[in-house]
Amino acid sequence: MNRRHFIQISLTGAIIPFLGFPVSSHAQSQTAFRTLRNNVGLFTGRGGTIGWLATPETLVVVDAQFPETAKVCWEELHRRTNRPIDLLINTHHHRDHTAGNTALRPHATHIVAHKAVPALQRQAYADQFPQVYPDLTFEQAITWDAGPERITATFYGPAHTGGDAIIHFQEANIVHVGDLVFNRMPCFIDLPGGAATIGWIKALEKIYSTFDPDTLFIFGHGNPKYGVTGTRKDIHVMRDFLVGLREYVKKSIQKGRTLEEMTRVDRLPGFPEHYLESWKEGIPNAIRAVYQEISQS
């Protein structure tokens, strides 16, 4: 087995603990269902943050977590409206955002995602557990009129994965960015799933320039101290973390340090708050991913 192949296998395996124990062990293990603005809200449970729009005219859900918490979310939504789910949108393919499709599909008219998502789901999980795939996909952007709200899903290119979409609720001025933001915590860089940190940085810069100071953002994951909502300032914090991660790896390579030496840290220099006690390998895993990415470029 050559070195590159070994790193690839190691990074692929890293998604298993991240999408299981660490996610369920920090603040997102406690369910919370709350409205933010204009009938748009969020639900936190086990996995990536769910966004929703619930009115008498329409019901839209963004991401699905795992089946057990998806069912809890559905029960809460049905207290607000008797409608079925008009659109269930997956921001990307990771199982903490799509495994709950199995619970929500009987209630949903369509499941929507970027065109890369079904293939990435199959590649990552087809042999592991039951999958429900999007039946409506898009390449660059797609827009719907949902009662008084207008919703746009947009793809800015490979970033956290090869199929990340951001979801803009235009009237509410709320944007669900999925896992393009891990708010003040280590991030997972899914190279086998098409991730590209340069593209991720560019996507965050595009998001910052596209939206305004009043835009409220929903993040896929967040340090319990900071939560899963924020402003453009938090978009820049995430961008700066990724820039710092790449600079750390590049400078370490220039100094002749080995990968083992680079990963003897649990916090990235200059970013002490990007840490979770329940995911101590988060920063070392991110360093390994960037090292592989840079080495192959």
Image (spheres, rainbow, N blue to C red):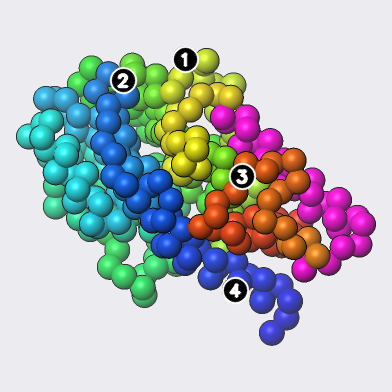
Do we see residue 233 in this rendering?
yes
Figure quadrant of the C terminus:
bottom right
* Type of secondary structure dominating the magenta stretch: helix
Q: Which mark is residue 37?
A: 2
Residue topped by disc 3: 274
**Quick one: SS at disc 3?**
loop
Q: CA distance from mark 3 to mark 4?
A: 25 Å
Residue topped by disc 1: 214
In this rendering, position of residue 228 left or right of residue 274: left
Residue topped by disc 4: 9
Identify residue type, mark 3: His
Nearer-the-camera pick, 242 or 195: 242
Residue 250 is covered by the magenta coloring: yes
Which residue is painted at 62% across and 29% down in the image?
A: 236
**Quick one: SS at disc 1?**
loop
> For mark 3, does the 10 Å Cα neighbourhood hold few (<14), some (14 to 19), or many (20 or more) residues?
many
Q: Give how far across and how far down residue 249 sits, in percent.
A: 79, 53
Q: Give how far across and how far down residue 148 sits, in percent.
A: 23, 17
Do we see residue 157 in this rendering?
no
